[in-house]
Amino acid sequence: MQTSAEDDEVIDAIGDAIAQLQSLKHLVFESSTIMTSRLLSLLPTRLTHLELINCWEIDAENLAMFLITHGSSLRNLALMHNQSLDLTFLTILAEACPSLQELRMNMSYYRHHDSLNDADPMYDFALLPDQIPTWPSSIRVIDIEHIRSWSIESVYTFIHSLVDNAASLLNLRELMIKTALDIPWQTRAELRHKLRHMLERVFLRECEDPRDTVAPEQTSSTHDPARPRKRKRSRSPKSPVRRSNRIEAHVRGSLRRPRRDNISQRHGLGRPLYREPDTDEDEFDDTDLSDAETQQSSSSDPQPELAVQGLCHTVDIVIDNQKTREFPYSMDDFFSDGEGSSGVEWDGDDDDDHDFSIAF
């Protein structure tokens, strides 16, 4: 108890000293043994930039209480290598930090002893499936690296918390998520492909090619999904005989055609388009469909419409199974600077220098 009382005295003294700095806006604690919930409560409420680096006493509950009482002025929050800190504080982030612009986290941790592997997280789960993060509308940068100790359901919860609120995240410009999942590689590859496609579709800014060689009339009719392609009807008073035989087949197939056309239009931005040869289906106008058929087409589509933000210049999601290390090694680390070549590589040009004749 004597040691705890002495620590409290030191914490109170540092808290009083920080409180005297009336113009303090930016504060950093790194590898600090006094950074506890007690010191967090003594920090000023006017801070706009806070960094906590390798402060192993700080957990999500302590940080959430601090953000609720002191987070109204925060603009930048950096949480690096804090071994006891998980992601559950994100559930109150929008309410506690309405002005937050940058959130950066690195969830890899340092080893405190060379003889022990004590760099594992001091929490059981980074996030549970029923813990839904909330994001302030002012956020511009979300950068969270080396997330681990969570399930696939938690990953979906985290990603959908961003996608479902894309309409309110109009200031978001950088989105970077890196996580490790210990699941079969095929499942991990499918999950990575699905989530990456979803995030890029919702948040990534589309840059059109400035050198567009498509004719203006063709570009406007192709890039506007609300205007279906039309052709002039034949002036002949009698329609072709083959057309009457294909109208029924066209009505059945036209319900599937708009989605295929939209996909081709989306992938054809900025590139010359080449129309297929004219067919009888081109003479049939999509607007001739009845209202009942249109409602059936919209109700039969199983994919929900996602709100597209489309303003981020960086969208990067990495899902792998690489074990997090304090010092990751690569092939270059196993070559010494003074190591010379083992010999000159043979190129086949020195055959003429040798005489292989045999004299008797």
Image: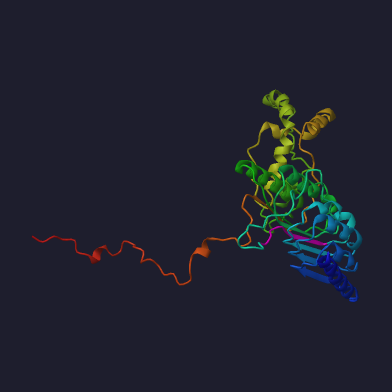
Compared across the picture, whether 48 is left or right of 178 comes to right
> Does the magenta portion include 116?
no
Q: Residue furthest left?
A: 360
Q: Nearer the viewer, residue 257 or 350?
A: 350
Q: Residue 35 falls in which quadrant of the image? A: bottom right
> Does the magenta portion include 103?
yes
Quadrant position of the N terminus in the picture: bottom right
Part of the protein shown in magenta: 101-110
Q: Residue 315 falls in which quadrant of the image? A: bottom right
Residue 311 point in image, percent of width and height: 78, 56
Q: Is residue 359 above or below residue 165?
A: below
Compared across the picture, whether 7 is left or right of 268 comes to right
Please tell me which residue is depicted at 60% across the width and 43% down the height of the picture: 185
Q: Is residue 67 above or below residue 262?
A: below
Q: Nearer the viewer, residue 282 or 339?
A: 339
Instruction: Give the tally of numbered discs.
Output: 0
Residue 218 point in image, percent of width and height: 71, 48
Compared across the picture, whether 82 is left or right of 336 comes to right
Colouring rule applied to residues: rainbow
Is residue 74 visible from the viewing direction of this image? Answer: no
Residue 161 point in image, percent of width and height: 80, 48
Residue 69 point in image, percent of width and height: 91, 61
Q: Is residue 234 above or below residue 221?
A: above
Q: Nearer the viewer, residue 240 or 143?
A: 143
Is residue 264 visible from the viewing direction of this image? Answer: yes
Q: Is residue 327 above or below residue 128?
A: below
Quadrant position of the C terminus in the picture: bottom left
Please tell me which residue is depicted at 48% across the width and 69% down the height of the picture: 336
Please tell me which residue is depicted at 90% across the width and 55% down the height of the picture: 95
